[in-house]
Amino acid sequence: MAHKLTPALYALLRDKTTPSGYTVDQCIQTGVDNPGHPFIKTVGMVAGDEESYEVFADLFNPVIKERHNGYDPNTMTHPTDLDSSKLRNGVFDDRYVLSSRVRTGRSIRGLGLPPNCSRAERREVERVVVSALAGLKGDLNGQYFALATMTDKQQQQLIDDHFLFDKPVSPLLTASGMARDWPDARGIWHNDQKTFLLWINEEDHTRVISMEKGGNMKRVFDRFCHGLQEVERLIKERGWEFMWNERLGYILTCPSNLGTGLRAGVHVKLPHLSKDKRFSQILDNLRLQKRGTGGVDSATTGDTFDISNLDRLGKSEVELVQLVVDGVNYLIECEKKLEKGQDIRVPQPLQNSPRK
């Protein structure tokens, strides 16, 4: 945001508001208050409603283009593909990969996004989503747990086990207004096996997560695609729909999550590769991002990393998960070579070929 917002552009946008009254000052407040992040480069702005991306497009579009590897919302369209049968080589070596996870977000059309929603809108999101989830059957059958009814110990255990979002200490949440009325209308739904989960009313209306221990990304992605399609069907049955358009894909609070909203990640042990000075360049060329295993606001500790796709927009879900599968397999191959004292090479940068 700071690279794109000029005084002239601010003057152009400062008096505009969305139909719900959201302003460009509210969009950029989180970036103004938090001019940097210790671990990743952040976008520095959020949307307060679906219309924010249209009303303030003169600022959002250049930010989107830089964040999403040249994707131009003015000229390109975003593809969606949830056919998990297309995924190849989706099972990792369990000696290196400790867990596999795919997540996305979805927003309910007609209701304000978390930085801008009223308490009534937030409760409506919870009501709509929880009533829909009650219709899930079979291995997706589960139940909802509201934060307001949990003990601190129960909450912390779910956080420590990587099932639940953290308490609202992130500057992104607090500066943007997403932590208002906490913990009202926030919660977690999960199936009986805790392999399919939905977060409700954290950074987005919903986060949909498929996860399990070990390296079977194929099974995780199968469950993700099936579960997500079932959730959307049940939402539509109740007369609601997700925010979506052909240029930006699925609409979420942070511009970094537009498009698929998808982050496919693994916790992977790379004791040798992580000490190699080429590690960061290899990740960049494979369009991968590393985080600490505690999430976006955590440092990496030891030799275990959370490795995931950097891009969300301009490529389909299948393409992004395939990119992670191929990339992580390359990292494991490098690790095995270094274990044997062999040399590794930095791969050529992946070419971006978004749809016109």
Image: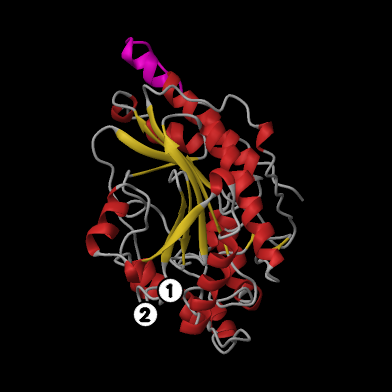
Q: Is disc 1 surrounded by few (<14), some (14 to 19) or many (20+) residues within 10 Å?
A: many
Residue 332 appears in the rendering: yes
**Vertical arrangement, residue 149 with respect to residue 356, above or below:** below
In the rendered image, which residue does mark 1 sit on?
A: 185
Please give left or right for residue 230 compared with residue 42 in the image. right
**In front here: 76 or 6?**
76
Residue at screen point 66% across, 58% down = 232
Q: Position of residue 341 (x, y in %)?
A: 32, 10
Residue sitting at x 27%, y 47%:
299
User: Considering the numbered disc 2 on the image, is that residue within a helix, a strand or a loop?
Assistant: loop
Q: Position of residue 270 (x, y in %)?
A: 33, 27
Please name the residue shown 57% across and 52% down the image. 68
Q: Which residue is mark 2?
A: 181
Q: Are marks 2 and 1 in contact (CB under 8 Å)?
A: yes
Q: Residues within 10 Å of mark 2 (few under 14, many from 20)?
A: few
Q: Label 2 to label 1, Cα distance in Å?
A: 9 Å
Q: Position of residue 246 (x, y in %)?
A: 74, 60
Which residue corresponds to the image point at 55% horizontal and 33% vertical from the top-left? Answer: 219
Residue 99 sits in which quadrant? top left
Magenta stretch holds residue 298: no
Q: Secondary structure beneath disc 1?
A: loop
Relative depth, front residue between 105 and 11: 105
Tell me the amino acid under the disc marked 2: Asp
Q: Could you tell whether 352 is left or right of 44 in the image?
A: right
* Number of residue marks: 2
Q: Is residue 34 visible?
A: no
Range of magenta residues: 334-346
